Image: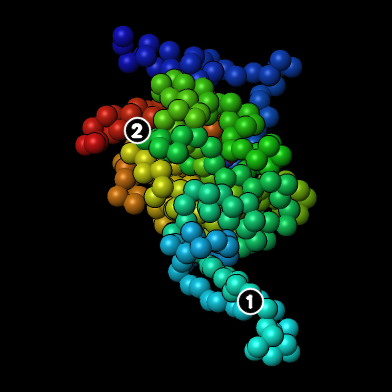
Amino acid sequence: MSELSRRGVFLDEIGLGPLWLRRDGGLPEAEPIDADATPQQAFAPAIEIPVAESPVEAEAVVQAQSVPLNNAAVSAWGDDDAPVTSPVTTTTVLPAAMDWRQLQKAVAGCTACGLCRGRKNTVFGVGDNKAKWLFIGEGPGRNEDIQGEPFVGPAGKLLDNILLAMGLKRGENAYIANIVKCRPTDGTGRDRPPAADEVAACLPYLQRQIELIQPTILVALGKTAALSLLGLDPATPVSKLRGTVHRYADRPLVVTYHPAYLLRQLADKGKVWSDLCLAMSTYANVDR
Ligand code: URA
């Protein structure tokens, strides 16, 4: 099959050959993330989140203190009469030391930045915990906030089609996550890219997800994902990052346009196809 017809098959597969139109004839509802949306590149030291109450979790303890239960009552009763109480151990575990359960719990209760105030749900990520492919977007939008799952809106439908065309499937050898776990909105309630401090607060969770998953390859979907992971100048456009195999945490990382951008800029679908070809050939050549 020629390159041209393979490309045609791919574009048909992902639902972009020739055009995705709504039944009313309009373009699909675009999500407010564009290829050159506000970049983020801040990296903060890992945050500390109290999560552990049981001795089992003490293995992952970074910092722990023992506090006797009801101190005041104990001293008032005097030593002899004091009831035997077991100490309550407050354990603080850094994301970098968390297992999956701890990480999910920490994200679900996270208040590390202001995004927690507006969220309906945190959006942890979805897929195969041992996936070889990790796709990383920007942050939840309205649909994701409601459902608690990444990429469930129109851009998500396109991403699912892209995965299928690559021989992948949500939940099978692919994991989908975002740079931030809570939906960023502006003053009028519209989606916006996450701010630098929000990225910095959230990134330790994604970093831990990557360590736990151990993916073979990462695909950064759009500018926020690419710049946040690569720590590049906020002015860097996605176009400059495409076509190169970058490295993140000693793994190959390929940058492509965000599916929401692609829905608005159908002319760039061929570029996404070539980015994914680069990702697939890189994956095929990784020593495993
Ligand atoms: N856009 C993203 O970057 N992530 C989502 O989960 C949904 C839309």
Residue extending farthest to the top is 1
Q: In which quarter of the image is the N terminus?
A: top left
Disc 1 is placed on an element classified as loop
Kindly indicate the quadrant of the structure image that contains residue 279.
top left
N-term mark: 2 or 1: 1
Residue matched to label 2:
279
Residue extending farthest to the front is 80
Kindly indicate the quadrant of the structure image that contains residue 27.
top right
One can see residue 186 in this view: yes
Q: Image point 45% across, 39% down: which residue?
A: 129
Q: Position of residue 16 (x, y in %)?
A: 53, 19
Kindly indicate the quadrant of the structure image that contains residue 146.
top right
Q: Where is residue 136 in the image (x, y as percent from the top left)?
A: 48, 42
Q: At label 1, which amino acid type do we have?
A: Val
Q: What is the crowding at mark 1: few (fewer than 14 residues within 10 Å), some, or many (at least 20)?
A: few
Q: Where is residue 198 in the image (x, y as percent from the top left)?
A: 59, 59
Discs 2, 1 touching: Cβ within 8 Å? no
Circle on res. 84: 1
Q: At label 2, which amino acid type do we have?
A: Ala
Ligand 1 image-quadrant field: top right
Q: Which of 127 and 278 is in front in this view?
A: 127
Q: Image point 63% across, 51% down: which residue?
A: 108
Q: Quadrant of the C terminus?
A: top left
